[in-house]
Image (cartoon, rainbow, N blue to C red):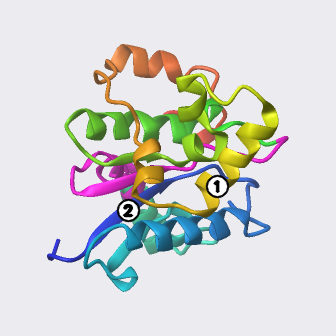
Amino acid sequence: LRNGHEIIAISHCWLSPEHPDPEGETFERLTRYLKAWTNTRPGLLLQRVAVFIDYCSLYQQPRSPAEAAMFERAQRQAHVWYGHRRVHVWLLTATPRGATPFRERGWTHFEASVAMLNAHWGGDVLDMGRCESGQRHLERGWPSSSVGMSVLVHANSHAMDATTFAMCAVPRGPPIAPKFFAKGLQGKAFGRPADEPL
């Protein structure tokens, strides 16, 4: 990785089997986050940020045989994007009403678990949902009214600065043991049942 360049891997929920973001809401939020995050990094230009998003970065259906082989190889190596210390990981944990929540999905469970290894060793892992939900403020016990919380959440998600991104940092914890990882996968939703054994 060259100096002055950054890589961000995005963990997000697919909102339909055909397209992860049919209405473009996730893309709009991600664009806002990227611009704000870049502004908090001295000397970093938006053009020097590479973003890994599975839908855009991997071949989708329909695939030629060569593309299918590359897709399968990329799936087997997906851990590199979320576990490498030089890769920033953003967990887009907020989901629209009616969608399967982030923490109940198989791929996002995998991506977040690998990202926890990254965070454990000092990597940069942000849970953008902490910003959108006001989780950090709730942990501190304030504000006590829903109106106050709405004001804070709106301010956090629309006027993002270094402090806001610091609030999104995933708390460091010990790595998850393989036995508990496998147990955590039980009952998780996969868009394609064929993905579960991976």
**Does residue 51 show up?**
yes
> In the image, is 50 to the left or to the right of 22?
left
- Classify the position of the C terminus by image quarter: top left
Whole-angstrom CA distance, mark 1 to mark 2, is 24 Å
Identify which residue is drawn at 62% across, 38% down. Answer: 134
Q: Nearer the viewer, mark 1 or mark 2?
A: 1
Secondary structure of the residue carrying tag 1 is: helix
Residue 152 place in picture, x, y as percent: 66, 46
Residue 48 lies in the magenta stretch: no
On screen, residue 5 above or below 12 = below
Q: Residues within 10 Å of mark 1 (few under 14, many from 20)?
A: some
| Quarter location, residue 188 | top right
Look at label 2 and name its amino acid. Answer: Ile
Q: Where is residue 130 in the image (x, y as percent from the top left)?
A: 56, 40
Residue identifier under label 1:
155
163 vs 17, left or right, is: left
Residue 163 placement (x, y as % from top left): 42, 51
Residue 147 as seen in the image, left or right of residue 124: right
Horizontal side of 99 relative to 106 (left or right) equals right
Disc 2 is placed on an element classified as: strand
Give the residue number, with chain letter if any, for mark 2: 8
**What are the residue bounds of the magenta stretch?**
74-98
Specify the quadrant that holds the N terminus.
Answer: bottom left
Out of 187 and 193, give the one closest to the viewer: 187
Residue beneath the point at 53% across and 34% down: 136
Picture residue at 64% right of the left edge, 30% below the top:
104
Please say whether residue 198 is visible from this viewpoint: no
* Magenta-span inclusion, residue 90: yes
Three-letter residue code for mark 1: Ala
